[in-house]
Structure formats: structure tokens, C-alpha cells
Image (spheres, rainbow, N blue to C red):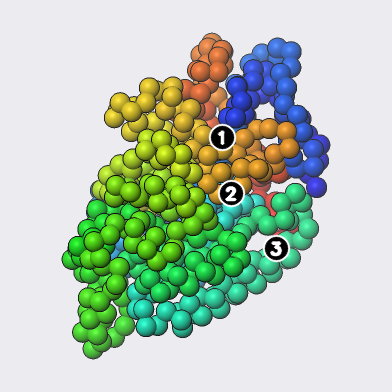
Amino acid sequence: MGEALSLKADWLLPVTGPPIKNGELQIAGGRISALSSVEKIKSSSGTVVIPGLINLHSHLDYSEAPFLKNAPLFDWIERLVATTRQWSREDFERSAAKGAAEAILSGTTFLVDSSYTGQSALAMHRVGLKGIVGLELFGVDATSAAPVFSHWQKRMEELEQELQRLQKATGSESSWSTDDKPIELTISPHSLYTVSPELFRLAVNWAKDRKKFVLTHLAESPQERAWTETGHNRLDSYLRTVLPGPAEEAAQRADLIKNISWKGRGLSPVESLAAEGCIGDRLIAAHCVHLGADDLGILHQAGAAIAHCPRSNRNLENGRAPLEQFLYRELKTGLGTDSLASTESLSMLDEAKALVQVLTEAGIFARDEAQQLALRLITIDAARAAGADDRIGSLAPGKLADLVVLESTYEDPKLKEALMQDGDRVLDGLFNGAFRVRDVYVEGRALVKNGILENPVQKVAG
Ligand SMILES: [Zn+2]
């Protein structure tokens, strides 16, 4: 149980309410108990408190994979597969640990991660991060959907046991008192072009029975849309490159790829998934860039959520997702970074900054509107998409004390004073490098202090 604590800052940005100048935030039992404005603090400390940031789409497993920019998605993914296929379990463990540390040091407290190996979940636990981790599922051969799914279930059981062992070994100190499932393990069928309809249905039914989320990549590239609508060669050649198996069975594999039933149905990727009954209110679909006319209506009606990844979409030449339409249709939406193999950092403030740039350059929003929106998309809106807005995503009494203390990077006291004058300047400062992450709290416990990882869980583990 976290101790009672009081934090003072020049500003509190609750996100769901107006900024509070000379703010004081009270924490008791791991939750926020009160927010108030106190009398003018003698001299400006240059600090701002914001909610813990939420990353709606990541792959911590690939944090040490080479970053490849300006490569079309399927060239990129072939290279990613070629590199990481050589990795040992220890390589993935080290890579996920690097990603988890980078995430929390940049102010993220909750991640929705798709994990090839499951190592993301263990790495998140070790630094005290919370979230939803989907163990990835692959299999394009419809005839082997049942055994492939059984194999996945076995891997999932092993992962659950490993996470439980780790939680037990790190003692009661490591288990969050107010949130009994800090890391929810679930399923992540990778995409339409890597999972057969039969296997996708098994995944969705498994999640439905357990009231769990389904994490997938959807309508990410123009090639994917062309493939489901008319059958596009680039995806076939990609599958021929990455599908494992002996050389003498290449002809069989080519036959299998030729007959994948998602292909050339005249449907968009979203319509294809909907036709299989695979879109529901617990689907978190990453990207959603290449959409047919009715696709947002389908997603909205089902109550599905979208993880918008502006930097990854740009870097892999997939174009810009129609965020303004997601908002207009009131779709549950948050921002995600994707992996360090396709983006520059795991910082949600960096992702939000890139979004503000895209939205203002395209003339879609005025700068201050874009900034307010971007902040919501990495806090309360992302929390709603992850079904956690009753617990996290804003500074409000009763919410978990997951929060970030930012500190001004300005050395000059006059500049600092000017920055902290009004809430609009503070908000602007979040997006132009005027602040650095100083402390990160999860349920009232400091996991990052003065920019350094505390690592309480590992300490207990010895
Ligand atoms: Zn991804």
C-alpha cells in the first residue's frame, strides 16, 4: 500500500479539467485523493504534473532491432524477420528490457503491447509498468488452424506461469495494491495477411470467452487493402519470403499462399474482418490508414478502438490515417509508437509532438487545438480505448496515482518564469522540448526519480 504523499508543482494538468496553477496533489493508498490550488509558491520550481502516459501500440520485444526509416512496410518487415529470426531468448529478453526502461523513463506508465515472445510482459513487470500484453499469433494455413491455436494456448499458459513466478519471487512489494491485474495477458493475431480467417476466429472466440482484448494490425498499408480487394502480389512475395519450412516444400507453400481466402474478395481489410465476425468492442486495431467508405461505421458500431501511430505510418510509407474522421465518428482512439524498429523513440510526448506537426501542417487544426487533442490521445482517450478510463488517464480524485512530474529544461530563471506564467504556454512547452521527465509514479510509488529508474521490483528480487 503506497504511503500518503503530497506533491506540489507550478501546474497540474488534469486533462479532464482546467490546468491548476500552484497546484497540490494528495495521494493516499495509491490513489489521488485531492487536487487543489495552494497559495503562491515563493519561487517557481518549473514543475508540471501530468497523468502517466499511455502507449496504445508497441512491440517492446523489438527494441534492439535496427531502426529502418523510409522503407515500405513489406521491405521493412522482411528485414525485421531476417534479423530477429537469429535472436535467442536472451536477445529478446535484453531487447524488451531496453524498451521497458525507455518507455517508463519517458513518462509512460501503461502500455498495450503486442509481443512475439511474451518477453514484453516480463520486462514491463520488472520496471513496474502496467498494461495489456498480447502474445502474438501467426498462421496462414487454414487447414492447421486448430493445432496452431493449441500450440499458442500452450505458450500462453507457460507465459502466465512465468509471469506469476516472477510476481511471486518479487514479493508483495511488487504487486500493486489497488489494481489486482497490473499486466493483463491476452491474444494478438498479428494481421489479416499472417493469420487465416479460421485461426482469427479461434483467437477472437478465446478472447470473448475471457472478456479480454484482441490486439491486431489492420488496414496499415495500401498493399494490404489492394490484397484483400483484388489480390496484390507484394503480400504473396512477402509470405513466400518469410514462411518457414524446407526448400523442397516451396511449391506447396506457394500453393497455400495462392489460396489464402482473405485475398481478392472485393472487401476492404475492415470489411474482411467484419465478414468473419471478428470485430467487437474489445478489438484494438493498430494503424487503420487505408479504409473503405463504410469502414469507420463498422468499427464504430462494433465499439472497436484504434491505435493511431503517426510516426510509424510515415516512416514505413503508409501515409496519414484520417484521425479527424476517427474523432468525428467518435471512435475510441489513442496514440501508439509501434516498435523502435519503425520509430525514433518510445516517448509518447515525441509521438504527440509529431502528431501536432502533422495536424497543423495539413491545416486540420490550429496549433493549440492540436496540442490539446494530442495530450488527450496519450492520456484519457487512450485509457478509454484500453477500457481503463475509470482508473487512469487523468488527474482526478479516486483515480490511481499514475503520474509524471515534468521539470523545465530552461536554465535562465527569467525564461523559466515566463514559461510558467500561464497554462497555454505550459501546454505549448510540452511539445517544444521545454520540459524533461523528472519523476514517474505508478500508484503513488516513485519508479523514476530525477530521471533515474528506481527499479523497485528488481531490488526486491535481489
Ligand atoms: Zn505494430
Give the Cα separation between the discs numbered 1 and 2.
26 Å
Residue beneath the point at 56% across and 72% down: 156
Mark 2 vs mark 3, foreground winner is 2
In the rendered view, tell whether residue 150 sits above or below residue 377: below
Can residue 374 be seen here? The reply is: yes
Residue at the (41%, 45%) spot, across then down:
308
Mark closest to the chain's N terminus, 1 or 2: 2
67 sits to left or right of 428: left
Label 2 Cα crowd, 10 Å radius (few <14 / some 14-19 / many 20+)? some
3D distance between C-alphas at marks 1 and 3: 27 Å
Q: Nearer the viewer, mark 1 or mark 2?
A: 2
**Is residue 10 positioned above or below 124 on the image?**
above
Secondary structure category for the residue under label 2: loop
- Estimate the spatial distance between the alpha carbons at disc 2 and disc 3, rounded to whole Å: 23 Å
The disc at residue 167 is: 3
Instruction: Say whether disc 1 or disc 3 marks the residue closer to the N-terminus.
Output: 3
Determine whether, in the image, residue 77 is placed left or right of residue 2: left
In front here: 25 or 376?
A: 376
- Is disc 1 placed on a helix, strand or loop? strand
Q: Give the labeled residue for mark 1.
A: 437
Kindly tell me whether residue 444 is visible in this rendering.
Answer: no
Q: Residue at x 46, y 31 (%)?
A: 373
Circle 1 crowding by C-alpha within 10 Å: few under 14, some 14–19, many from 20: many
Tell us which disc is closer to us: 1 or 3: 3
The residue indicated by pointer 2 is 387
